[in-house]
Amino acid sequence: MAHGNLSDLVFLGLLVFAGQWFVCPHTLFQDVGPFKAQFSTQTPDMSATLKLGGGLLLTIGMMLSGVSWNPVNGKMAGFAGMVGMGYIAYHLFQLDGNFVPRLLYVYAFVVFLGALHICVFPSNPLPKKTNATKNNHGNFSDLIALSLLAVALSWYFYPQHLNQDLGPLKAQFKNPSADLSTLSKFVAGLFLFIALMFSGVKWNPINGKMGGMGGFIASGYTAFSVYKADGEKFIPQLFYVYALVLFLGALHIFAFPSNPLLPKPDKTA
């Protein structure tokens, strides 16, 4: 059973972080106890990205808690999560020239712990294969994974696209900054982690319920926030596309999973 282990402790931490990003984003722009301010200037672009990132933190947390992680289904996502969080920690260290305690280190550390747990120290044995066992690859969750992987890589290697009009889509960001660049690198790591969760897990009628609910909240809140920020006018932008992809992925694992529920092990055997 997935509950009561490290993945649930990480879930609780990510739930708190998501709440902070949703309700108290100003705390990232000021010193908090021993932690120096993470960012300097709050802008509409920063606000929109924090809301998107908060939704991703929530979704990751709920996936970590809802899935029974075994020696196979967490390998890809866990490795991706460790790489993404290691990269943002290295980036922060490079920016400051030495270690300056900041909240992004805390967020990255907690996500890293969750990734390490599902990649190296999963709490459940590998389920036995039966005639009903399906291969989870090639279905709708993999299409979502490929889409989110493309988003993550584009944020890492060509973030300038967010400042440009792309066909009918208007530029998402209006005011590029060093703060926005750092936040975008962290959010890219979250996209990478979620993408490989969608691909690596055999989603069934139980294990996708929490993650699906998190995805609904993330996609709905992201789209609503962009709509409100634009003066309650629909202006086609990339964040709407991300919200749609997250919603479709959440709907798939919540309501239309591709695998049957695994039989419970026979305790009398």
Image (tube, rainbow, N blue to C red):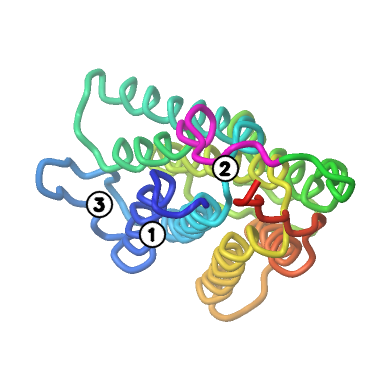
Q: Find the residue positioned furthest to the front.
A: 268
- In three-dimensional space, the C-alpha distance between marks 2 and 1, rounded to whole angstroms, equals 19 Å
Q: Give me the residue at 35% from left, 50% from top.
A: 9
Q: Position of residue 233 (x, y in %)?
A: 62, 78
Q: Which is more toward the observer, 119 or 141?
A: 119
Disc on the earlier residue, 2 or 1: 1
| Residue 26 x, y percent position in the rendering | 27, 60
Q: What residue is shown with label 3?
A: 29
Residue type at numbered disc 3? Phe
User: Looking at the picture, which amino acid does disc 1 mark?
Assistant: Leu
Instruction: Specify the amino acid type for callout 2.
Output: Trp
Residue occupying image coordinates x 37% and y 28%: 89
> Is residue 86 depicted above or below 35 in this figure?
above
Mark before the other along the chain sequence, 1 or 3 = 1
Which span of residues is magenta-colored? 116-127
Tell which tag, 1 or 3, sits nearer the viewer: 1
Disc ID at residue 15? 1
Residue 22, percent from left and from top: 38, 65
Q: Is residue 125 magenta?
A: yes
Find residue 69 and name its label: 2
Q: Is residue 199 left or right of residue 33?
A: right
